[in-house]
Image (cartoon, rainbow, N blue to C red):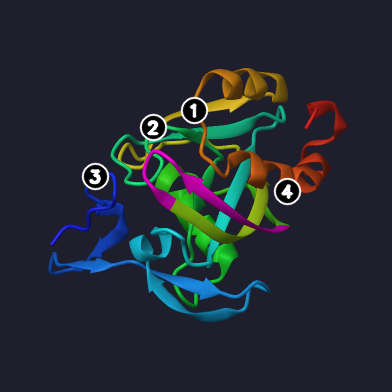
């Protein structure tokens, strides 16, 4: 039976298919305010208001010119479809290290392996998404890195990509919809971003 969120869209990315073709719900790791694992919850249930605090990750990859790789989420996504966001974000499976999950999802969504991937701290936030009615209660592990290969986005995950300078990001952010969490995670990652890209990049 398909999982249907509050906005009526079918949440195909809230379940995984077994080798036999059956759909099994994706489980997330619930955490306390210190990031300690306290249990698990089904992905969509964890995002229903008021939301359950769960582990997540966000990746920011840059090219050799210091430009940030953005993605526009595919229109078929049940959460925040069609909006721009950071390079990659998602949730580790229960027991999966955030670093491993970040590398895995970057490969799955963008078809690339980061040339470098480094931890950039954590941030905790509570961001409701008015369009879907879902809530992001997340303890987010941040990662920054470099990408040298040409991305090959999965169209089921990503509608469009763009490499942007800080000025181009500001212009795009003023004109186009972005994910509710984007500026929170970017601001939290900025110290590591500046260390990675250098002062001349302007981040």
Q: Magenta segment: does it hold 126?
A: yes
Q: Give the foreground label among 2 and 1.
A: 1
**Secondary structure state at the residue bearing disc 4:** helix
Residue 62: in magenta span: no
Q: Residues within 10 Å of mark 2 (few under 14, many from 20)?
A: many
Q: Outermost residue, bottom direction?
A: 38
Q: Which mark is residue 177?
A: 1
Q: Position of residue 157 (x, y in %)?
A: 36, 42
Q: Which residues are magenta?
A: 121-134
Give the quadrant of residue 121: bottom right
Residue 4: x %, y % from top left? 22, 53
Q: Are marks 2 and 1 in contact (CB under 8 Å)?
A: yes
Report the Cα–Cα distance between label 1 and label 4: 20 Å
Q: Where is mark 3, residue-wise?
A: 9
Residue plotted at (60% across, 37% down): 148
Q: Badge 2 is on which residue?
A: 82
How many C-alpha atoms fall within 10 Å of the one at disc 4: few (<14), some, or many (≥20)? some
**Distance between mark 3 and mark 1 Cα atoms:** 19 Å
Q: Which mark is residue 188?
A: 4
Q: Is residue 182 left or right of residue 95?
A: right
From the image, give the main secondary structure of the stretch colored magenta. strand
Q: CA distance from mark 2 to mark 1?
A: 8 Å
Mark with earlier residue (3, 4): 3
């Amino acid at each position: 039976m398909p999982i249907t969120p509050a906005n009526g869209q079918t949440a195909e990315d809230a379940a995984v298919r077994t080798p036999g073709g059956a759909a099994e719900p994706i489980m997330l790791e619930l955490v306390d305010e210190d990031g300690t694992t306290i249990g698990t919850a089904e992905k969509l249930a964890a995002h229903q208001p008021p939301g359950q605090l769960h582990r997540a990750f966000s990746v920011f990859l840059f090219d050799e010119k210091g430009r940030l790789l953005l993605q526009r989420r595919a229109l078929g996504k049940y959460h925040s479809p069609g909006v721009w966001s950071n390079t990659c974000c998602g949730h580790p499976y229960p027991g999966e290290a955030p670093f491993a999950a970040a590398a895995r999802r970057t490969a799955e969504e963008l078809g690339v392996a980061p040339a470098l991937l480094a931890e950039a701290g954590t941030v905790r936030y509570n961001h409701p998404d008015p369009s879907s009615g879902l809530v992001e209660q997340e303890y987010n592990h941040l990662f920054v890195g470099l990408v040298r290969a040409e991305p090959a986005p999965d169209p089921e995950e990503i509608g469009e990509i763009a490499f942007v300078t800080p000025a181009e990001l500001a212009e795009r952010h003023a004109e186009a919809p972005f994910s509710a969490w984007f500026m929170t995670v970017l601001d939290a990652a900025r110290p590591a971003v500046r260390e990675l890209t250098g002062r001349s990049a302007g981040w």
